[in-house]
Amino acid sequence: MDDTGQGGGKLGELFDERWRVGPLKDGTFRSPLHDERIAAILGIALGVAFTVCFVTGLISHVAQNPPSWFTWPSRPAWLYRVTQGVHVATGIGSIPLLLAKLWTVYPNLFRWPPLESIAHLVERISLIPLVAGGVFMLTTGFMNHMEWYPFGFFFPVGHFWGAWITMGALLIHLVAKWTVVGTSLRRGGAPPIERNGLGRRGFLAAVATAVGAVTVATVGQTFRPFRALSVLAARDPAAGVQGVPVNKTASEIKVLDAILDPNWRLRVHGAVRRELVLSRDDLRAMPQHEARLTIACVEGWSADGDWRGVRVRDILDLAGASDDATVIVGSHQRRGLYRSSELNPDHARDPDTMLALELNGEVLHVDHGFPCRLIGPNRPGVFQTKWVNEVEVL
Ligand code: HEM
Ligand SMILES: Nc1nc2c(c(=O)[nH]1)N[C@H]1C(S)=C(S)[C@@H](COP(=O)(O)O)O[C@H]1N2
Ligand SMILES: [Mo]
């Protein structure tokens, strides 16, 4: 790098030239691609990508853990699908960006002198949470999207706190590098060309191509026009019984006996004027509603289906629940976070929120939640509870 060996600050004088061995020697890193301007351009791209990830990640967080002053709306119906699809796509696209950036700047680890000033020390230390955080976010995010959970912590909690640490370190880094980025972008000049090698433009074009390639090869999991190109995606949004992927099957969750019981009933209770106990025939005898709605899984895939069933609000009216009631929809599943979900009044009263009995013209498959499952607009997939047997009005 052209700023190595300046030796300016006070701390720099503490380092004896005799310690300058191995990669610390001048001229170890010859590629002109270890370049400030490339680092600046990749840094800006990563800053934008991480900010998009952070904002869309926080949206997913408040959709799933709404603070008391906030209600996640049921409209627009496509909102969560888009924010979470963008989150995972931007995150995956950041992987080649981060690798390229780290490669470009790693010779700085061997800068001489290693430290120049207290400000330099602080800036160096802030790189630890930045690099570790960036790598942690992209690896845990990617593993989660691949449905691979080898780590011993609950993914969203680690990923959530990792995001704050990473973004904090990114902010410090941005302040520290602001002037350098400005000058190196203005300086322009002839791009460095290594003899027989890749120039600056070529290198950036290669990185952009890699970002484009991983995006095109994965985004079809949520963006249907790219489905045929989606060779690297964790999910094919059209592969699954009744044309919709299945996350957890009925036999995995061990609900088959309960849902196939001829005496199956749906119980509606809590703050209601009449408790209801409804059979499948009772539900089929109620007015049936149809809507095309999306399963938008938090893990980044999404799929549409034509759903048919009973509106939740019709069930609430039949039971005499109040208009502004919050509702818990429970299932036969015994354990696990996703065995039930909450409907805020907006979702409970939405004309498309229903207990579906059919999917794409067929009786709901056991793996999609037979006899009935919750489906509504703009809900994270984890809240589209399957194998519903209980509606509790709060
Ligand atoms: C390869 C890159 C990434 C992938 C594939 C990815 C994937 C995911 C997934 C699947 C979730 C949903 C978790 C859940 O609710 O179960 C999520 C949530 C989140 N992500 Fe990422 N992510 C990536 C990178 C990032 C980055 C770079 C940031 C921020 C700098 C970030 C911030 C967040 C936040 C704040 C949440 C919400 C966590 C919560 O609900 O508490 N992600 N991400
Ligand atoms: N009872 C129950 N409902 C559940 C789940 C679950 O594990 N248990 N998984 C959820 C998740 S994570 C998603 S993405 C959707 C998937 O629905 P599908 O299998 O019909 O596509 O169901 C949701 N409903
Ligand atoms: Mo999901």
Image: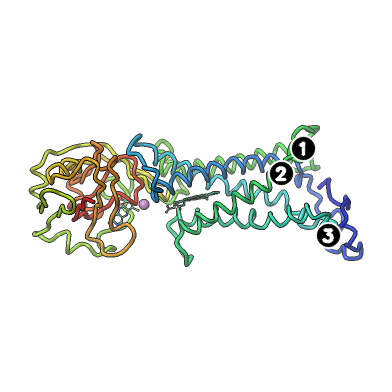
Q: What x and y, as percent, mark residue 63? A: 39, 46
Circle 1 Cα neighbour tier, 10 Å, few/some/many (<14 / 14–19 / ≥20): some
Residue at 13 percent across and 44 percent down: it is 320
287 or 257, nearer to the observer: 287
Q: Quadrant of residue 77?
A: top left
Q: Which residue is mark 3?
A: 24
Q: Is mark 3 within 8 Å of ligand 1?
A: no
Q: Are marks 2 and 3 in contact (CB under 8 Å)?
A: no
Q: Are marks 1 and 2 in contact (CB under 8 Å)?
A: yes
Q: Quadrant of residue 305?
A: top left
Give the amino acid type for the residue marked by disc 2 in the picture: Ala
- Of the image marks 3 and 1, the number of the one nearer the N terminus: 3
44 or 54, nearer to the observer: 54
Up-down: is 316 above or below 134? above
Residue at 64 percent across and 46 percent down: it is 171
Report, in whole angstroms, how far the alpha carbon at label 3 lies from the one at label 1: 24 Å
Report the side of 216 relative to 104 (left or right): left
In terms of secondary structure, where does tag 2 sit?
A: helix
Give the amino acid type for the residue marked by disc 1 in the picture: Ser
- Of the image marks 1 and 2, the number of the one nearer the N terminus: 2
- Of the image marks 2 and 3, the number of the one nearer the N terminus: 3
Up-down: is 49 above or below 14? above
Residue at 19 percent across and 45 percent down: it is 358
Residue at 23 percent across and 57 percent down: it is 331
Q: Which residue is mark 2?
A: 39
| Dot label at residue 184 | 1
Q: What x and y, as percent, mark residue 49? A: 57, 42
Up-down: is 196 above or below 117? above
Q: Is mark 2 within 8 Å of ligand 1?
A: no
- Which of discs 3 and 1 lies nearer the camera? The answer is 1
Circle 2 Cα neighbour tier, 10 Å, few/some/many (<14 / 14–19 / ≥20): many
